[in-house]
Amino acid sequence: MNKQEYINQAENALLHTYNRFSFVIDHGEDVYLFDTDGKKYLDFAAGIAVNSLGYSDDYHKRAIQNQVEKVMHVSNLYYNTPIAEAAEKLLKVSQMDRVFFTNSGAEAIEGALKTAKKYAYTKTGHANHEIIAMEHSFHGRSIGALSVTGNAHYREPFEPLMGGVRFARFNDFESVKAQVNENTCAIILETVQGEGGIFPADTEFLKSVRALCDEKDILLILDEIQCGMGRTGSMFAWQGYGVKPDIMTSAKALGCGVPVGAFLMTEKVAQSSLVPGDHGTTYGGNPLVGAAVSAVLDRYDELSLCEHVQQIAPYLDEKLNALVQKYDCLTEVRGVGLIKGLVCTLPVGQVAAKALENGLIIITAGSDVLRMVPPLIIKKEHIDEMVEKLEQTLSTF
């Protein structure tokens, strides 16, 4: 079939919940994707911050293939070796104490919220506890995750959602403090807001929120689904701030393409929250995803990916800032490490579409940001190629 026939096939069969680009992917190599016509694209989206190892990591692929030959699924009624190994490695790099593996980021958020509520219930003996979330945040599209997502556009069609959620302003500590009451059990925020426009937390803000949580015995939940797994130059973004959460969530690059998420917690939280019967999943933490996570963490260590991000990110900053100086339509660079946003006065959806025509994959965030979350293995030559293709794109407007 040709490209249009594939597109027609998908449109006739799939529920129309995505406005997809006219681009049918065939395969990937290194940091490039190829469509069914053989055209090559430089990928600066990485499947929305998922494919940190790019598309040619043989170790990762072999680990998955080898596990397929053994067993892919056994259920959580039994132990399995890959997930035990993956859990041990993940706890080591995350500095957390307990982990529950899920199938997605949204499920990780659901688990984190349930953990916080059960912790408060265990402590007080009653329910009806509240959670403080941030305006312009994004935590997922399930009912619980939507309830703490700070964008009314996403929430309104599905209301009433989970009750007891109050919204504060990101990077405004007094706004957070004003929402706290005797029923507050948790504060949830992205260490770097992604979908909301690439806004890193201010150091003083994060430290103040941590201190408030300590004072009131409120749990701090940090959503590291997009900004974690080395993207900021630390394995998890909070590690660069020195502000440890009570609960954190991970997904996306955790499996580098294999669908897996996780919520992690301190031992203190684990000992006073979820017990057998409180939470579960059929597929979460099965041998296949365990092998994938374990291999990903091995490769991060072998490739020194966090150090590589620290080294390559300043070059990306330099090139993006030069673009801002050159083009009036570009006004600001946001972000940290390899999660970057270019604020753009042009219609960003149109810019992303035109960039695709020029062989560059970028995505958007918020209403006016061109988002760049490339594979973490990119080199200077890839950044130079991105700049060339983006300039070619901007010249058409």
Image (cartoon, rainbow, N blue to C red):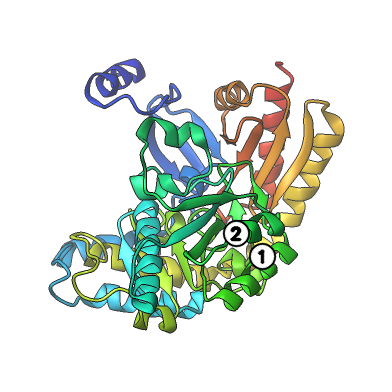
Q: Nearer the viewer, residue 84 or 27?
A: 84
Q: Check the image and report above or below for 394 versus 154.
A: above
- Disc assigned to residue 206: 1
Disc 2 marks which residue?
191
Residue 283: percent from left, percent from top:
21, 59
- Disc 1 to disc 2: CB gap under 8 Å: yes
Q: Residue at x 49, y 44 (%)?
A: 48
Q: CA distance from mark 1 to mark 2?
A: 8 Å
Residue pictured at 47% horizontal, 78% vertical: 96
Work out whether 180 lies above or below 325: below
Numbered marks: total? 2
The part of the image, by quadrant, that contains residue 260 is bottom left
Query: Is residue 222 in view from this perspective?
Result: no
Give the label on residue 7, or none: none
Above-or-below relation of 237 to 328: below
On-image quarter of the N terminus: top left
Q: Residues within 10 Å of mark 1 (few under 14, many from 20)?
A: many
Q: Earlier in the sequence, mark 1 or mark 2?
A: 2
Amino acid type at image mark 1: Leu
Which x, y percent locates residue 349? 58, 24
Horizontal relation, residue 145 to residue 316: left or right: left
Q: Is residue 33 left or right of residue 340?
A: left
Report the mark closest to the observer, 1 or 2: 1
- Placement of the C terminus among the 4 image quadrants: top right
Q: Give, as a three-letter code, the residue at label 2.
A: Thr
Residue 250 location, x and y as percent? 44, 61
Q: At numbered mark 1, what does the secondary structure look like: helix, strand or loop?
A: helix
How far from the left and from the top, in percent, is residue 367? 62, 30
Asked which secondary structure carries label 2, the reply is loop
